[in-house]
């Protein structure tokens, strides 16, 4: 049967007051993929309906594919994690990481400041060598690599007289200085005549996808708060569909995508699959607009600065 669940208020609020509520407040805005599959089977599969006979496992497959594609392009902002840096100034990527949206650190006022990727340091594999600089090999004849390359090690141990926190509140026109303004090194990326990609006081990072690690520059310290906003395929809990969620504002678009993919594979419905393709594209576009979460008062506040002169 079709499912449309509404949690009781006691489940929604009582957990905040020490009660036995199990729902997360605000969870009604999402629905799990199990409910989407059940509703799809009721609405589109059966005698006299668009799809006469489709096994549930095939519907489940295309539901997962829809969630993956929509996670990449429509509701990509769902995932964010915050960690405290250790003394190694490294961060491990989440298990369901696909691509990043942004890195930021939280200053003492609670502001999230963007961290930019390093333009001068890139990840690499350091080859292990002996005292004669000869490559080292394992028992199978493959080259042995060091756990961390010397390039990354020097990047993280570069001399920095000012921490990222201090640089964030320090504004006299010096950017990306590893020595501070007291030294001639502080002239790098000066305010006038600067190089834009180096005009950054918030520190930098190096992303090593091979090692699954993120290395942060020496201006950071242990216990600094780092936030990673990233794109997932939405199926991190693939073993349990009840823990795979879709925003209700995109639910119709997900079902339209499932319908198109199922009709294009069947000779009895392939002639109308082009119509369902257009419908799926239109509903996906609508879902993007809905989830963009544009609010008129917020946009009005931003546009109040339109009369300011912008100098080039």
Image: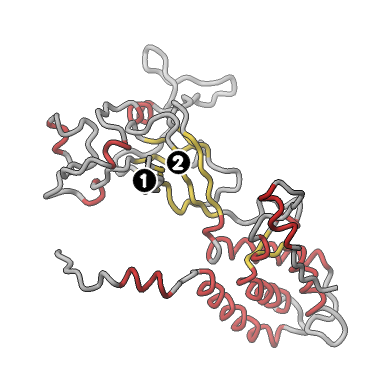
**Residue 121 or residue 167, whichever sits in front:** 167
**Residue 179 or residue 44, whichever sits in front:** 179
Q: Residue furthest top?
A: 131
Is the residue marked by circle 1 packed among few (<14), some (14-19), or many (20+) residues within 10 Å? some
Q: Secondary structure at mark 1?
A: strand
Residue 119 lies, with reference to residue 262, above or below; the image says above
**Residue 45 or residue 228, whichever sits in front:** 228
Gap between marks 2 and 1 measured at Cα: 9 Å
Q: Is residue 91 left or right of residue 182?
A: right
Residue at the spot of label 1: 115
Q: Are marks 2 and 1 in contact (CB under 8 Å)?
A: yes
Is the residue marked by circle 2 packed among few (<14), some (14-19), or many (20+) residues within 10 Å? many
As drawn, the label of residue 70 is none
Q: Residue at x 13, y 38 (%)?
A: 187
Quadrant in which the C terminus is drawn: bottom left
Residue 67 lies, with reference to residue 277, above or below; the image says above
Residue at the spot of label 2: 226
């Amino acid at each position: 049967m079709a499912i449309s669940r509404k949690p009781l208020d006691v489940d929604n609020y009582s957990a905040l007051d020490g009660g036995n509520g199990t729902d997360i407040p605000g969870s009604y805005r999402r629905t799990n993929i199990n409910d989407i599959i059940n509703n799809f089977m009721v609405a589109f599969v059966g005698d006299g309906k668009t799809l006469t006979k489709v096994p549930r496992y095939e519907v489940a497959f295309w539901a997962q594919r829809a969630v993956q594609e929509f996670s990449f392009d429509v509701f990509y902002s769902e995932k964010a994690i915050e960690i405290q840096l250790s003394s190694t100034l490294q961060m491990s990527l989440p298990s369901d990481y696909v691509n990043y949206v942004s890195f930021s650190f939280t200053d003492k006022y609670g502001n999230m400041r963007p961290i930019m990727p390093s333009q001068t340091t890139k990840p690499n594999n350091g080859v292990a060598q002996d005292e004669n600089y000869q490559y080292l090999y394992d028992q199978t004849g493959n080259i042995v690599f060091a756990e961390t390359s010397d390039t990354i090690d020097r990047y993280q141990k570069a001399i920095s007289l000012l921490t990222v926190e201090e640089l964030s509140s320090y504004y006299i026109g010096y950017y990306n200085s590893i020595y501070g303004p007291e030294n001639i090194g502080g002239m790098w990326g000066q305010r006038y005549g600067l190089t834009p990609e180096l005009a950054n006081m918030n520190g930098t990072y190096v992303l090593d996808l091979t090692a699954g690690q993120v290395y942060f520059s020496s201006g950071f310290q242990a216990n600094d708060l780092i936030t990673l906003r990233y794109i997932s395929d939405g199926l991190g809990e693939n073993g349990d569909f009840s823990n795979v969620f879709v925003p209700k504002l995109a639910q119709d678009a997900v079902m339209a995508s499932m319908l198109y993919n199922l009709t294009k594979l069947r000779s009895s419905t392939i002639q109308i699959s082009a119509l369902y393709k257009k419908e799926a594209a239109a509903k996906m576009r609508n879902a993007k607009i809905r989830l963009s979460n544009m609010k008129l008062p917020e946009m009005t506040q931003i546009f109040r600065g339109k009369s300011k002169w912008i100098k080039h």
